Image (spheres, rainbow, N blue to C red):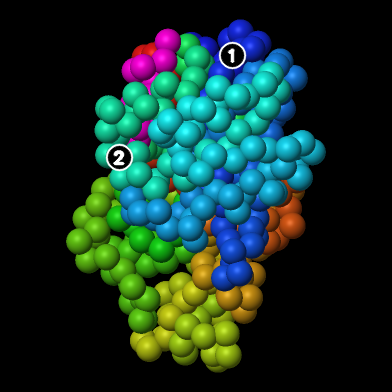
Amino acid sequence: MLTKLVINNIDVSGKRVFVRVDFNVPMDEFQKITDDTRIRAALPTINDLVDRKAKIILASHLGRPEGERNMKYSLQLVQQRLSRLLNREVLFATDCVGPDVEKAVAGLKEGDVLLLENLRFHKEEEDNDPEFSKSLSKLADVYINDAFGTAHRGHASTEGITKFIKQCGAGYLMKKEIDYFNRSVANPVRPVVAIVGGAKASTKIKVFMNLIDKVDKIIVGGGLAFTFYKSLGYDVGKNRYEENMLDSVKEIRQKAREKGVKFYLPVDFVVADRLDPRATTKVVPGKEIPPDWVAPDIGPASVTLFTEVLHDAKTIIWNGPMGVFEMDVFSRGTMAMVRAVANAYALTIAGGGDTDVAIHRGGESDKFSFISTGGGAFLELLEGKTLPAIAALTDA
């Protein structure tokens, strides 16, 4: 999975370097950045290129403009924050292809940083259009992909462009993501524990099937646990379960037994008469969920059990929260797991399914070995898939 070329092995001095970054950052209703983690994650690559006197062209998407020039998604909103973090001027191009952009690139001096406008203002980006890829390639001598968050997308700026530029490689963030994934899944220190949460079992079936061959224990939480509960013949109250997934989750449990993988479900839940912060709540055993109640969080006994399961872990992989942690009243289970994983004497890797949001909210991000910047990309790696953008670098 490791690419043949990483940025530190490429001569970039005086060259135009096109860097695909992931500046798809969350914003509030006032168009203010609420979390700049993804921008900060790209700084080592950008600073290295500045120090080595490259001419740096940064390209990213923001939001889902659907191929329209919607200024709500303009990367000019990111320019100021990036400039402050780099402590240097960041130039801005009002498009990402065309004569004006080519002129702006031609005027770059060594060490200059130019941020292009949103790639997805052009529908050809997501279509992986060859002509659009070629237009992007005209801007550079070297291509670096440092956008792990979009590595599962075969787009013009992540895959197509590599067909037109001879020197292609991975940035430091991309390399770090791949290295940590290999350390946790491909070649881990055992015992390995996977924590899998989230709302739907259907979105995690392939994750379970892949991880069973690689881990020693699996902890299940979140809404997807109710499909497992239903498959065991238990009532799940008003909680949603997926009827068409019952056979699949039975197969997962059977495969886990055959492989000797320990499989842990919640043993109690925080239940509520409605999904509302002001709802009436109580803690009940897993087999005693009232008919008309929902269970938006795991209970204290489950937290104790799961914490004990982690006690001898040497590697922990976490994907997906334990409940509706966005509401404070239902966040205790997820926050308790954040603390348990953070304090474990293990290599701890988390990503996808809002797991990173929960960890940052719990104030324990510094204690995790690595928090992936990729949601869908991290999930697809857990499913055992080859990511198009990484394959493109390897083949380039």
In the rendered image, the vertical position of residue 39 relative to residue 314, given as above or below: below
Residue drawn where x is 20% and y is 61% of the image: 244
Q: Position of residue 285 (x, y in %)?
A: 50, 75
> What label does residue 124 carry, if any?
2
Q: Amino acid at mark 2?
A: Glu
Q: Residues within 10 Å of mark 1 (few under 14, many from 20)?
A: some
Q: Is residue 395 above or below residue 23?
A: above
Identify whether 364 is placed above or below 323: above
Q: Secondary structure at mark 2?
A: helix
| Residue located 61% across and 69% down the image | 30
From the viewer's side, name the closer residue of 301 and 15.
15
Q: Nearer the viewer, residue 209 or 58?
A: 58
Does 240 lie within the magenta span? Answer: no
* Residue 341 spot, x, y in % from top left: 66, 49
> Which stretch did the figure color magenta?
155-166
Q: Which quarter of the rendering shows the N terminus?
A: top left
Q: How many marks?
A: 2
Residue reaching furthest right? 87
Q: Is residue 167 visible?
A: yes
In the rendered image, residue 53, in percent from the top left (x then y), is placed at: 70, 16
> Residue 192 — which label?
none
Q: Amino acid at mark 1?
A: Lys
**Of residues 316 and 395, which is closer to you in this image?**
395
Residue that badge 1 annotates: 15
Residue 394 seen: no
Q: Is residue 224 left or right of residue 28?
A: left
Task: Check the picture and name the quadrant holding the C terminus.
Answer: top left
Q: Secondary structure at mark 1?
A: loop
Mark 2 Cα-neighbour bin, 10 Å: few <14, some 14–19, many ≥20: some
Mark 2 vs mark 1, CA separation in Å = 26 Å
Main secondary-structure element of the magenta-colored stretch: loop
- Residue in the picture at 75% in, 20% down: 51
